[in-house]
Amino acid sequence: MNPSHGEPPYEPAADPAAQDAAHPPLPSGQPGQGGRPPGPSGQGASGQAAGQGQVPAHYPSHPNPSGTPGYQADQAFAAGGGLQWSRISSRHAWHRLLTAVLWAVPIGGVGGFIVWRNGGVVPAAMWVAAVVLGAVLTWVVAELDRRAYGYAERADDLMVTHGVLVKRLIVVPYGRMQFVDVTAGLLERWMGVATVRMHTAAAATDATIPGLRALEAAQLRDRLAQKGEERSMGL
């Protein structure tokens, strides 16, 4: 600018590096320019984030407040692959109940008579009540066992699950099957049910499916036999 017009002469701006050296920024966490006020925990920006309920990314996430594990034990006994367990007939429980009643009648009658001759009416009544209670408990356990039983036919193996107190899952490959048999006693034939057994070289891996209706048992027998032949021919 022209100094003759009363304006101050032009002066070049100072070096920014020199200004930064002359006026260094205040450290973080102190009041003033270039810093942030300390948070409630006295740790600067991190304390402020903790005071506002924000958890840094490197902190581990909180555990499940309910305390339940992410893995459920029943998932180990799922059929998998979108398959559903095929259940056995409700006649399985009634077959167990009729069997228990057929045993309870002679045991209760003969035992009650012997107890009555030796101890009187009250002990004989207690004996009969115990026999009846045993038959009822047998039916309850049989019904729970029926609900726990299931089987699923997959492409390469047969899965069978059962058990009330201790659940068990058996996977039998069709290629290891030796033969399939169907059995039915007098009472089972009268009720129209049968038991299908899939035998392998190891007796511990044999699959047993009781309480199947006669038609369902025959169809399952034929399917297992056909799949066993196909797998054995491919070996």
Image (cartoon, rainbow, N blue to C red):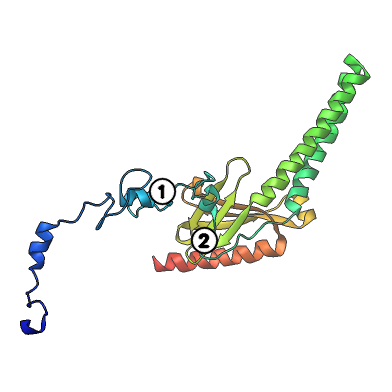
Above or below — where is 17 with respect to 36? below
Dot 1, crowdedness within 10 Å: few (<14), some or many (≥20)?
Answer: some
Which of the two labelled residues, at mark 1 and mark 2, occupies the earlier sequence position? 1
| Residue at x 64%, y 50% (from the top left corner) | 148
Residue at the spot of label 1? 51
Is residue 106 rendered to the left or right of residue 137?
Answer: right
Q: Secondary structure at mark 1?
A: helix
Is residue 87 rendered to the left or right of residue 229?
Answer: right
The image shows residue 154 at horizontal and vertical percentages of 52, 64
Is residue 163 rendered to the left or right of residue 140?
Answer: left
Residue type highlighted by circle 2: Gly
Q: Work out whether residue 170 can be spotted.
A: no
The image shows residue 20 at horizontal and vertical percentages of 12, 61
Q: Which of the 4 image quadrants contains residue 1?
A: bottom left
The residue at the far top in this view is: 118
Q: Work out whether residue 6 can be spotted.
A: yes
Q: Secondary structure at mark 2?
A: loop
Q: Nearer the viewer, residue 7 or 42?
A: 7
Residue at the spot of label 2? 80
Q: Nearer the viewer, residue 128 or 107?
A: 128
Contact between marks 1 and 2 (CB within 8 A): the answer is: no
| Residue at x 30%, y 49% (from the top left corner) | 44
